[in-house]
Amino acid sequence: MKKLMTIVLCTTCISVNIIAQSGVRIGNYELFLKKVENNSIEQIVLSEPCPPCPSENETRPKPKFTPYQQSDFFYGVGLIVPDNGDDYYTALGGKSINIDAGWMRRYHFSRRFALGGTLHYSYYNYKFRDAASEPFFNNVVLKNNTFVNDDIRKQTYRSHNIAAGAFTRFYFIPPVNRGKDGLYIDLGAQGDFAFSRFAMLKTHSEGKKKHYEDYAFNPFNASAVARIGWKQPRRSVGKVYFGGGNSRALFVRYRFTDAFNTRSLPMDLPPITIGVQFF
């Protein structure tokens, strides 16, 4: 009898040691045994995981998407693509630029679709090559000025605009963190009102002069806009966050209206701008 009790006691101790080290799972429950210093069993803890694990035939439902709105401040820089065709004045590539700065607001209807709008300031600077020598431009804008040899140092057209636009956004890679990441494309249109527009001529003999000709320069323009962008979530090291300025987009803007009044000037400005925007 003593031998039987000794065998049972040894078996129990070995089993307790094994169970206490790893625990035993029974269905959704786990069985743990806690020990005191003399290796005797103090208590048995029966715990259920939190939250409970779904059964084999049960699938956990996906969280329901809740529409949300989001706003961003953005700024951008673009280059005007020169067009040397007969319909356009020659603009110097790399020196004719566009600058944007303003606000964007979006309403996300689903993980892959959103509608948005922009309100921003837009600046255009077209640097010409031979506009002053074109007869109509010289007559209408420069009032028949005559220039000797290489007297002209710089000739440009500049406009300061208030622009408003609307677009649809489609996500190739949906955002995980409520619009803070993802890969998307925007397709939309915008309208510009040029509250200040003028041609500027800088010569050696007379210095810099601005020529305002409201009849020749149209105040309203409309453009189609396409934008491909990606947003990266902010990363943190301790309490310092990184990546807030890593949201950017490449854009193409095509102006489908005339910047110049064709009744006064026979040629127009190049219509395509390509650039990058930061959010």
Image: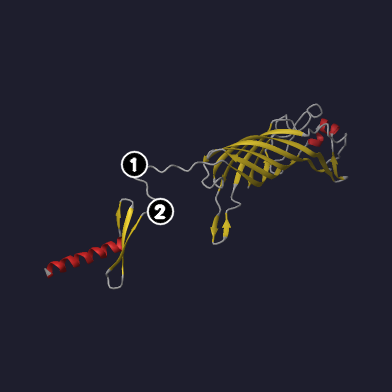
Residue 161 or 9: which is nearer the viewer? Answer: 9
Q: Residues within 10 Å of mark 2 (few under 14, many from 20)?
A: few
Task: Give the spatial CA distance, label 2 vs label 1.
Answer: 19 Å
Left or right: residue 20 compared with residue 10: right
Q: Residue at x 85, y 36 (%)?
A: 142
Seen as rendered, the residue at the extreme top is 263
Left or right: residue 14 compared with residue 251: left
Residue 141 or 133: which is nearer the viewer? Answer: 141
Residue 85 percent coordinates (x, y): 70, 31
SS for dot 1 = loop
Residue 94 percent coordinates (x, y): 69, 43
Q: Residue at x 60, y 46 (%)?
A: 248
Seen as rendered, the residue at the extreme bottom is 38
Q: Quadrant of residue 41?
A: bottom left
Residue 200 percent coordinates (x, y): 82, 41
Left or right: residue 226 compared with residue 149: left
- In the image, which disc is placed on residue 90? none
Q: Residue at x 38, y 50 (%)?
A: 52
SS for dot 2 = loop
Picture quarter with the N terminus: bottom left
Which residue is the site of mark 1?
57
Please determine whether, in this image, residue 191 is positioned above or below residue 121. above
Q: Quadrant of residue 91?
A: top right
Which residue is the site of mark 2?
50
Q: Amino acid at mark 1?
A: Asn
Residue 236 percent coordinates (x, y): 54, 58
Q: Quadrant of residue 153?
A: top right
